[in-house]
Image (spheres, rainbow, N blue to C red):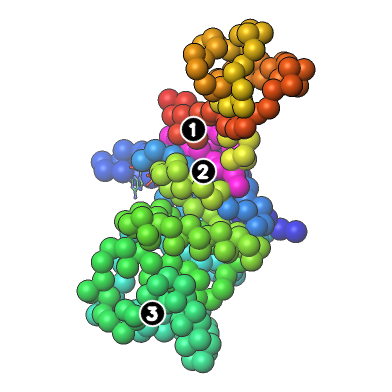
Amino acid sequence: MMKPIEIAQLSKTYRGKRGRKVEALRGLSLSVSEGEVFGFLGPNGAGKSTTIKTLVGQIKPSSGRALLFGDSVAAPKARRKVGYLPENPSFYDFLTAREYLDLAGRAFGMDAALIESESDRVLNALNLADASQRPIRGFSKGMVQRLGLAQTMLHNPDLYILDEPMSGLDPVGRALVKDLILELKSQGRTVFFSTHVIADVEAICDRVAIIAQGELRAENAVSDIIAEGIEGYHVRLSQTPPSEFNDFLEKGLPEKTGDLYVPRQQFNAFMRQVDQSGCTINLLEPKRKSLEDFFLRIIA
Ligand code: ADP
């Protein structure tokens, strides 16, 4: 099976002002598998938008390869199965949301009946049905962003390439978009999105790539990062801990409660001791470094 996204040794050098060169991408390689939600993280200026614009054929790379479902991004065919949300989308604002989707649907070669039914579907999904007959001019930034997402879903693509999809949304809008991405995943579709909001990645991504200065710094399963980040466990026992537990506890035995903190390295031995002592654990909670710590360490 062809991967939805395959990038190999991708480089892009912009010619800036007065011939100054900007190396936005330096030999970036990564691939995204079918059905994955893939987060593309990096600080401002890291090269995220450049990568995304290359993937959707808006800019030509200086060297390297970018394929969508096995087709070069230079071939229009490659983009047919893709829904693309640009950063800060903007539309002809004299159109209503429905008129805009109508235009987009025709650009995808959909017939009128299909455009109508699919417009209903995506307007409902993005909570825009009530506003569908209003000119975009009067839309809030969050509504414009949601209309952009509605448009990416109109032709039911298999791959979604979203540049900062959560930006400009209020908490309700963010939750809506997160749920939508998870729903697309449950349908077996692939979502690749850039963000600098790490919490969004933690909540919905299977894998994450971190880039900085146009280079890949890390590519990991989010579950691995989270597991690696476990520093220890908060344990609540049903009774006062026996004194031999002291050996396992960084901070010593608690004064009154059965609440303990066990560092990760001690955890297996601690559990054996719990077993022998006949104590009961009422609560066990991992204490972990956040993805944020991981990110900051990687880009530092
Ligand atoms: P990100 O999306 O991660 O913030 P970009 O891909 O937008 O990063 O930018 C990467 C680098 O390329 C930055 O240093 C940016 O200033 C530069 N850059 C982006 N677009 C252009 C352009 N059209 N001309 C010159 N430099 C550019």
Q: Residue 202 carries which label?
A: 2
Marks 2 and 1, Cα distance to the nearest angstrom? 9 Å
Is the CB–ligand 1 distance for label 2 below 8 Å?
no
Magenta extent: 206-220
Residue kind at label 3, given as amino acid type: Ala
Q: Disc 2 marks which amino acid?
A: Glu
Front-most of 118 and 89? 118
Q: Earlier in the sequence, mark 2 or mark 1?
A: 2
Q: Mark 1 points at which residue?
A: 290
Question: Spatial distance from mark 3 to mark 1, Cα to Cα?
Answer: 38 Å
Element type at mark 3: helix
**Quarter of the picture for ligand 1?**
top left
Q: Quadrant of the C terminus?
A: top left
Front residue of 72 and 198: 198
Q: Do the residues labelled 2 and 1 touch (CB within 8 Å)?
A: yes
User: For mark 3, what is the residue?
Assistant: 129
Q: Which of 92 and 38 is in front in this view?
A: 38
- Residue drawn at 26 percent across, 66 percent down: 140
Prevalent SS, magenta region: strand
Mark 2: secondary structure: helix
Find out whether residue 211 is within the magenta segment. Answer: yes
